[in-house]
Every structure is written in structure tokens, then in C-alpha cells.
Image (cartoon, coloured by chain):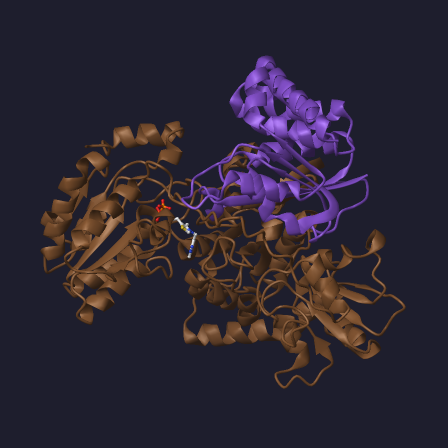
Amino acid sequence: MGKLLMLGDEAIAQAGLDAGMSGMYAYPGTPSTEIMEYVQKSKQAKENGVHAKWSANEKTSMEAALGMSYAGKRAMCAMKHVGLNVAADAFINSAITGVNGGLIVVSADDPSMHSSQNEQDNRFYGKFAQIPILEPANQQEAYNMVHYGFEISEKFKVPVLMRITTRLAHSRSGVETITPKAQNELVLPRDPMQFILLPSVARKNYKTLLSNFDNFISASEESQFNEFIDASDKSLGIITCGIAYNYLVENYEDQKVPYPVLRIGQYPLPKAKIKHIMETCDEVLVVEDGYPMVEEMLKGYLGKEKVRGRLDGSLPRDGELNPNLVLAAIHKETFTLDPIPSTVANRLPAMCKGCGHIDAYVALNEALLEHGKGRVFADIGCYTLGAYEPYQAISTCVDMGASITMAKGAADAGLVPSVAVIGDSTFTHSGITGLIDAVIGNSPITVVISDNYTTGMTGGQDSAALGRIEQICEGVGVDPAHIRVFHPTPANHDQMVELLKEELAYPGVSVVIPRRQCIQTMKNKELVTKVKELGLNKK
Amino acid sequence: MKSDIILAGVGGQGIISIAAAIGGAALHENLHMKQAEVHGMSQRGGAVQSTLRVSSKPIASDLIAYGSADMIVSLEPMESLRYLSYLKPDGWVITNAVPFVNITDYPELEDVYAEIKKRSNHVIIDAEEIAGQVATKRAANMVMLGAASNFIDIPLESIKEGIRQIFGRKGEEITNSNIDAMLAGREAAQKFL
Ligand SMILES: Cc1ncc(C[n+]2csc(CCOP(=O)(O)OP(=O)(O)O)c2C)c(N)n1
């Protein structure tokens, strides 16, 4: 259908549409966000009625995608790597139920933590679930793999995990697309018990999954994505996973590597091909972005094999790879980077000038002066940047939703008052359940829900909390007298401090809602209108 | 031909438009290209960097290897120094002279310039002033694109085409003033050659 310049994320989204996907399910998270955003903007998606609304969190998105698969249609679910921790229960069990319509779960990992709290390698989740994994090396391969992924998902009746990393997700290159396929018809699973994971069914399904594993290996063996490229110098063999292949061939004229290379794009690993390179080469270097997963499999825990990689120090144990590191590993040298000139100062990200979170923090800091430091349990969002100077307003940031529950735990331990700071989107993502715990325990905590009507940190996506935070809090049992809203501006500072002090003194659960629109979303007319209709901007 | 370019700046300054214009020009010339962007956290006023690779041969890596970039094009002087390790020994540092100060410990500007001038191949121009003369200050990024265009083996006509692709929707006038800004930057940089 022609060549388009696309981000890796966009190639995946377009491929889904061209493969007849009926629904895209996701919660925003860098570097996966642009997959859903592309589908939301796509004319093709609109014309074909493809579902493209954000979910409340990754678990709900995974389950909705599985529901669509149950109904016989192709569905895709995309998230950042840590999102799969949230969706893990649904994800692992979807391998046991199996699928009806094709199902692809895209995990966008973030080696070097460009925008994340860890660099976990979600290939392990695919291995854990015992399903096929696809790992593209470039945008074109990402596009092709989605088509192939849906095919094998339907052929083997299992979900397929597609693992990409930041570098591929956010890099643009030309992609050749093909003629779109029609969507599947609505059709129920042939076996009406397939999706009922009572132990008797689960045991049977699990045996089916296990017996399929050899078929997955055969598929990997024949896969066009697992290519063996022979060469004459057998003193070294090189196994690359996904994008790492690019960092290898970058070092050689016309991409011609003098050593045999096995490039892996599909798991489980192709046994015969692995065996061949292990047997014919003196040593094997494994190059993978992420954890040393393949390396450890080949080396064994005791390290008996002649395998090099991240575990023996040939490559760094953590962080993203690059062409220089791979070349140094081949030649058993160390690569050291020239230092940045000392004149250069750090320039960390910061909250925008005029952001409502800032005014809320300035007030909170003052209200807490009499209680001392170390009491603010924050969460994940733009407001996490309140950790830096000049605010230094928070003490924790762990995972989405952890603010309320950690404040509760600390209060249980006697740290009273304890304060949680959470954003509106994070609140509906996974804060509500923690608030229920706090209400049931009548915990003496103050929950600050800093409401800017959007999912700010990831670029201003819709927030499921819009216009319903007070209702939710009341609904889970917070006393309405202790649900208090204010308009965070420098002019309202004294009033905010007073209000916060009152709630800090209250020996039960209070919710304080600083509420002002994110200044980055002021151009979003749809949101501005909605906020007006809901009457949210009361001063 | 082959051009490996590091684009640098501060989140929000608009380095992506430079990449998009060169990318459009490259496609117009039927060249291969890869362009890595920065999304997410650092967009919030932090240091940002984008890599652009254009070549007549297929390109493997999305990342540019250290010590191999042909040029660093920066919208901010201090940021041009942050990525020096990517530059090849005779590569060019092409930077806007106007600092973007959103931190309290921004170094002495003279020290920054002195560090840049340690590289014999450098271009330092006041992109905002030049942009203001022929268009508006907001076209500073097109001035920097023009400065860089002296060192990229792509015909000027195609660079203009790349700009037209970005601004075409906004009408003739805006497109032309951005092209003017590019041409002014191209000329201003030539005295450093
Ligand atoms: C499990 C998980 N999913 C997604 C993300 C990505 N993420 C980081 S911050 C954020 C948005 C938070 O929005 P909100 O709580 O409204 O705060 P804001 O950024 O608007 O201040 C998201 C989605 C993450 N870190 N972890």
C-alpha cells in the first residue's frame, strides 16, 4: 500500500489496523503511548469502528482485550513494561484460557530508564506465561510481526507477547504496508468451557499449553525472524536479540559481519539453530537489550558454556546497548566514554511554570512545617518532580497507586499525620482500592488528589477521573465533610494552608483536591469545553 | 552520502521540526533515514536530544555510535556540549548562541562559548536575532536548520521541500517566512567555513 515514515509504535498500530484488529486497549505509558494515540487519530480505524478508548489501567485493558478475543475478534493491548506488572494476573491466566480471536500484547520496555522507575525485561513475562514472544529489530519488522503474530495467535490459540524497547518505539523510519484485511466475524469459542478457569478446566488447559510448547519451538525454528547468517571466522559466534542486531552490524562495512550471526526475533529460542552456532563456534557472544535472559539460558547457572555477554562483563550488566559497546565486546576491550565537559550543568525535567501542582506543594510544605519532614508519600506523574529543589516535597515514589497505601501503612506504624499525593489519572488507575483500605481502617491520613483533568506526564491523555473524584471518594466511604476542593494559585495560598492544616489534624481519612487544569492542555478545546460543562473550574 | 546528526536542545524548544524537515528532504531525495525522538519525562524542560541519520545506503542502528556523528545541531549553547562524545574528531558543532536558562546553576556564558570554540569546526550564531530579521523569533529552529544545511549533502531545493511539507498546511506566507529563516541561517553560517 506504499511506504510511510513511522515510529515503531505507529508501525505496530498501523499493522494492527491492516491485520483486521477490532480493538486497541491501553493505558498511557512511555514508550508505548503512541500506539493507542495513532489508532485514535486514524481515519481507517474510525471508518472500521475499531475500539480506541483509553482504559483505566493496564489490567482492565488486558482483560477487555481478552474479552474481545473471546468474542472471536482480533485485539491488541499495549503498555509500558511496568504496566505488565499491573496486568500480570490477567496476562498469565490468558495463556491458560488461550484465545479465540487473535490477541497480541505489546510491552514497551525502557532499558536505561529514560522515563521509568526500572528497566525490567518483559521477555521474562512471556517465558513465564510460556507463550511465543516476538521481538522486532526495526520498524518494518515490527509491522510484519504484528501480521504474523495474529496468525500464530489464532493458529496456536494463545496470546502472543510483542516486546519492543524505547529506541524502536520512538524512532521513525520508512515502512512498507500491505492491503488491509477485513475484521473477524463475531464467533464464540468452540469449547464453551475454554474460558472458565475452574481447577478442572485449568488443569486440562494447562496441559494443552505445555504440549504446545514444542510447536512453538518448531515455529521459531522455521521463522523468518530467526535468521542464521553464516560467515567464515568461527572463532566467535554472535547471537543478537531484537534491536541489538542493529548495534552489531552498524560496526561493519555494508553490514557484513565476519563471524556467524544468529539473529533472534521470535521465542521460545529455536533449539536447532542455537545448537548449531554453539557447536560450530569457539565462543558465543550474546547481545541483548535488557536482562541477560538468553545468555543465562545458554550459559546455565553454573556458567559452564563458553558464552559471553552481560554476565561475564563483556557487556555492561545494565543499561541500553549501543554500537560501541558491542564492538568492544567482540574485541574483548572496554569502551570508555569521554566525560561531558565540566562547564555543563545538569538540566533535569521540572514542573512547568504556572503548574497547579507547584502551588499545592508550596502550601503543603508550609502546612507540614510543624510536623516535620518525611511524611509525604507521593505517586507517579508530573507531581513526582516535586522531589527536586526547590520543593523537595515528597519522600516516596514507587509504583502507581502506592501513595495512599504506603501512607496508610506508615500511619499504621504511628507516623501521624501521613500524607498521600496522587494525580487524578493515577487515582483511577489504582488509587481507589487503596482508599477503600484506608476507609475501612479509619486511617489518620490526608490524601491529596492533585487534579489537573489529564494524564499529564505522558502527554495529556484523557483522565478517567474527570468530574467524578468526589463521587468516587464518597462512594467508597470517605466522610463528605472531609472531601475538600481548592483552586491552587499563589493568591489562594493562605487559604490552602489553613484548609490543609485542618485536615491534617483530623484523625480519619480526608481527601483534599487541589483542582486546576494542566496548562499544557489549554489548547485542547474538547477538554476545555468538557471542564466548563462539568462546572469544575470553581475558584 | 551519509549524514549522522545529533539534534540537541531543551524540552519544548522544537528540535523535532528540524528533524522532520531534514527527514522530509531525505525522503524527497529517496535516501534512507532513521530518526529517534525523545518522548516522555524529559520533555518537561529537561535536556533533550534526537538523532537523525540519513544515508544513501541502508541504515542499521537507530542510535549514532559515539565518536562518529558528523555534526551536533543545538538550539542552545550549553546543550551542544552535552553530546560532544558522539562527535567525530572533525565533526561540526553548530549552535544557537542564545542560552535557555531554566536552572539556577547555568554556567558563565563565556565559559560555554570557550568550550565550544575548542572545536575548530564550530558555528555559533544568534538564531533568534537572525530569525527576527527575516521572519519571527519563533523561526530560530529553521535558522539552525539552514546553518546545518551547509554540511548536509542534500540539494537546497529538497531542504525547502522538507520545510514545505511541515508548514504547507499553514499557508504560503508562513511557509515562505520559514524558508527565508532557513536561508538566512545558511548564509550566516558560511562565514565560519
Ligand atoms: C503501571 C504504570 N503505568 C503507566 C505509567 C506511566 N505513567 C507515568 S506518570 C503517568 C500519568 C499520571 O497522570 P496523573 O496521575 O493524572 O498525574 P499528572 O502527570 O497529570 O500530574 C503515567 C500514565 C507508569 N509509570 N506505571
**Picture quadrant of residue A453:** top left
| Colour displayed for chain B in the image of the structure | purple
Identify which residue is drawn at 69% across, 25% down.
B186
Which chain is drawn using brown? A
Left or right, A353 with respect to B16, comes to: left
Q: Is residue A14 visible?
A: no
x, y percent for residue A449: 25, 49
x, y percent for residue B71: 70, 41
Q: Nearer the viewer, residue A61 or B103?
A: B103
Identify which residue is drawn at 27% across, 63% down.
A405
x, y percent for residue A402: 32, 61
Examine the rendered structure and indicate whether residue B76 appears above or below residue A212: above
* Residue found farthest to the top: B173
Identify which residue is drawn at 19% across, 48% down.
A512
Left or right, B37 with respect to A115, comes to: right
Q: Quadrant of the N terminus of chain A?
A: top right
Examine the rendered structure and indicate whether residue A278 appears above or below residue B91: below
